[in-house]
Image (cartoon, rainbow, N blue to C red):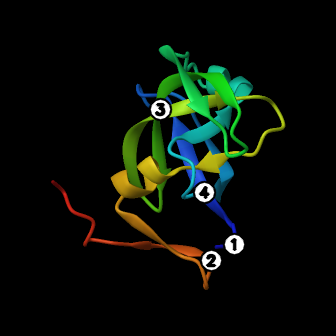
Amino acid sequence: MGTFKWPVTVSSLDGQRSADVEATVDTGSLYCAMPARLMRGLGIEPERKSRMRLAGGRLVDVELGPAYIAIDGERAPMLVSFSEDGAPILLGALALESLRLSVDPEAKRLIPNPEIPLY
């Protein structure tokens, strides 16, 4: 499946600060990934570190912090990975499922999917 970008709003849990970004839709990534500088600029600090495996197989320690992710008027709280400056902004599988969105790879768009099971 080819990749594509989609507009996303990331905001602090108190709703005081937000930023609109273009994120690469990445169903192979569990978490969303945002530059650490952006996250801290929104007043979001890491809550914990977690060891994760990158697509290339390398294990890394990543910082995770809470944020709201909003797409097309729907929002959900997420743990977001703090990435290095210059790394791609990623929209991961947890956000897609939490927002009940599916990927249309041919049209390169996100579509609402009420069929995603609640339980």
Residue kind at label 2, given as amino acid type: Lys
Q: Position of residue 29 (x, y in %)?
A: 57, 48
Residue 116 located left or right of residue 56: left
**The residue tagged with tag 3: helix, strand or loop?**
strand
Q: Residue at x 37, y 44 (%)?
A: 76
Q: Earlier in the sequence, mark 2 or mark 1?
A: 1
Q: Residue 108, which numbered label?
A: 2
Q: For numbered disc 4, what is the local secondary structure?
A: loop
Q: Residues within 10 Å of mark 3 (few under 14, many from 20)?
A: many
Find disc 1 in the rendering and name its residue.
2
Say which amino acid is labelled 1: Gly
Amino acid marked by disc 4: Asp
- Residue 57, quarter of picture: top right
Q: Quadrant of the N terminus?
A: bottom right
Dot 2, how many residues are within 10 Å of its Cα: few (below 14), some (14-19), or many (20+)? Answer: some
- Up-down: is 29 above or below 86? below
For the residues carrying marks 3 and 4, which lies nearer the camera in this image?
4
Residue that mark 4 sits on: 26
Q: Which of disc 1 and disc 4 is earlier in sequence?
A: 1
| Along the line of sight, the residue nearer the viewer: 57 or 108 | 57
Q: Quick one: label 1, few (<14), some, or many (20+) residues within 10 Å?
A: few
**Horizontal and vertical percent position of residue 47:** 47, 14
Of the residues under marks 2 and 4, which one precedes in the sequence?
Answer: 4
How far, Cα to Cα, is label 4 from label 1? 9 Å
Residues at circles 2 and 4 in contact by the CB criterion of under 8 Å: no
Looking at the rendered image, the disc whose residue lies closer to the viewer, 1 or 3, is 1
Q: Is label 1 in a helix, a strand or a loop?
A: loop
Counting residues from the start of the chain, the first of labels 3 and 4 encountered is 4
Q: Decide which of tag 3 and tag 2 comes sooner along the chain.
A: 3
